[in-house]
Structure formats: structure tokens, C-alpha cells
Amino acid sequence: MSSKPVEAGGRGPTELTGMVDLTRDAQGKVHARLLDLVPGRSGRASADWLAARTTAFRTGIKVATLHPFHGYNNAIGDQLEDATAVLDAFHVVTLGTTALDDVRRRVQQDTTGHRGRSGDPLYGIRTLLRAAAENLTDRQHTRLQAAINAHDAHEAVFVAWQRAQQLRAVYHQDTPAQGRALAEKVLASFPTCPIPEIARLGRTVGQWSTQLLAYFDTGGANNGGTEAVNGLIELHRRIARGFRNRDNYRLRMLLIGGGLTHPNLA
């Protein structure tokens, strides 16, 4: 199970949280299904929704994925005591990319005295820094190295890029054991990094160490199915040009998300 903020659009209420079922079939494939749209974007909204479900429904949830928001984690702890909370891999990697962007912007400002402009070395590689290292061509690697070599201060950007790539690599190891081992290295080394943005990233993921490592004990549980459902919601919201009535919006999204016939929701 997972929860995710969604937009209602139109002139109606927009603060909603989608509750998504991520049940796997016998072959281990996830079949994501929208269970409900809950007013509010808070842990309390999720906790209240879970509290209103049947005991059989709550005890049947063994894994709950979430992005790094303590409200959702508290809701899982309060209402799903037997469920394993798993930090979503996409959001973990996004934290690393955001920290890298912060380093690049800071160094850009320190070395040029202005925000990135066309022709600035770091501004020119901003997209390359976000890409996976293994997907870069030889030419792109050369551009990246040239931008780093353009100024001694750019070395901090290169180190931050390496750390972001290391965090991403946690989820691309051959075995769960290898992934866990690399994740433990990240948790141990990032908080002591001399680059403040990476040290802050290390402290952030350190707060979620249990949920991060749970990824390797749950067959790689993640929010991929949740993002797919959100894509359907966004598509139909655009087609409808938004919704003025939240009840109509909820019913329409449950119809396209497959949640109208889910058992044990009463």
C-alpha cells in the first residue's frame, strides 16, 4: 500500500491524498489500484482513513511504501503496526539529485557572482549532472570533465555528483545483499562529507535508515505503481478540464483507478 498527494484541479478543493493498493500477484508483479482519495495532505488524513477501515483490511497490509514525509510514516506506525514501512527509491534518488543541484548553484554563485547563464561551465552541464553515469556518452563525459576542470572550486560539484551517483547505485546492484551493503556505506559516510549539502543529505537519509534498508527485505517495494495511478489521475483531470465537485472527482478517479469494487474498504 502507498499514499501520494494528488491535485484535483479546476475550481474545487485540491488538497487530496491518494491511497493506492500495490498488491503483487503470484508472479510478483504489482497491480496498482486506487483505493480512495482522502481530503487533506497530511499524516492525520491518512491515519484517519486507515482507522476507518476494517481490522481485516489493516492487518492484511504487510508493506507500506512512502516518500520521506514523517506524517505518512507516523500514520503507518499508528495504524499499521505490523506493516513494514519502505522509503520509495525514486524519492531517495531525488534527494541526492536535489543536493547535487544545490551544490552546483552555490558554487556557480561563489565563482561567478550570478546565477547560471549560457556559457557558464556549470550551467552547461546541469542536465548531464542529473543523468546516470553509465548512460553518458564519451563526448558527454568529456564535456563534464572539461566543466569541472574549468575552476578549482568545481571539484566540489564533481564530488557531489559522485555521491549522487553512489546513492542511485544503491538500487542498481546485482543482489539485495550488495545493495544493502552499499546503502550502509552511504549512511555511514555521507554525514561526514565536507560538502555541507551532502552532509545534510546524509543526515536526512540517516533519519530514514530503517525505511531505506527495508527496501532490500521486501523484494524492492516502491512507489512505481502509485506513480502510474497518479499519471492516470493527471491524464483524466486534464481531459475533464478539472473538477468543481470533489465527490464527482473522487468517483471518476476511482472508476479509472479500479477502486470501486475493492473488498474490506467499508
Image (spheres, rainbow, N blue to C red):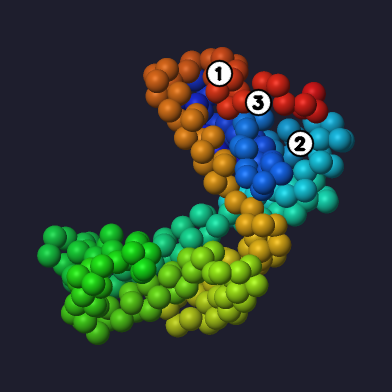
**Inter-mark Cα distance, 1 to 3:** 10 Å
**Residue 78, position in %: x, y?**
80, 47
Residue under label 3: 259
**Residue 200, position in %: x, y?**
51, 70
**Inter-mark Cα distance, 3 to 2:** 15 Å
Vertical arrangement, residue 203 with respect to residue 117, above or below: below
**Label 3 crowding class (10 Å Cα cut-off): few <14, some 14-19, many 20+?**
many
Looking at marks 1 and 3 on the same chain, the residue that comes earlier in the sequence is marked by 1
Amino acid tagged 1: Arg
**Residue 262, position in %: x, y?**
72, 26
Q: Is residue 25 left or right of residue 182?
A: right
Quadrant of the drawing holding the N terminus: top right
Q: Nearer the viewer, mark 2 or mark 1?
A: 1
Residue under label 2: 50
Q: Residue furthest front?
A: 27
| Label at residue 252 | 1
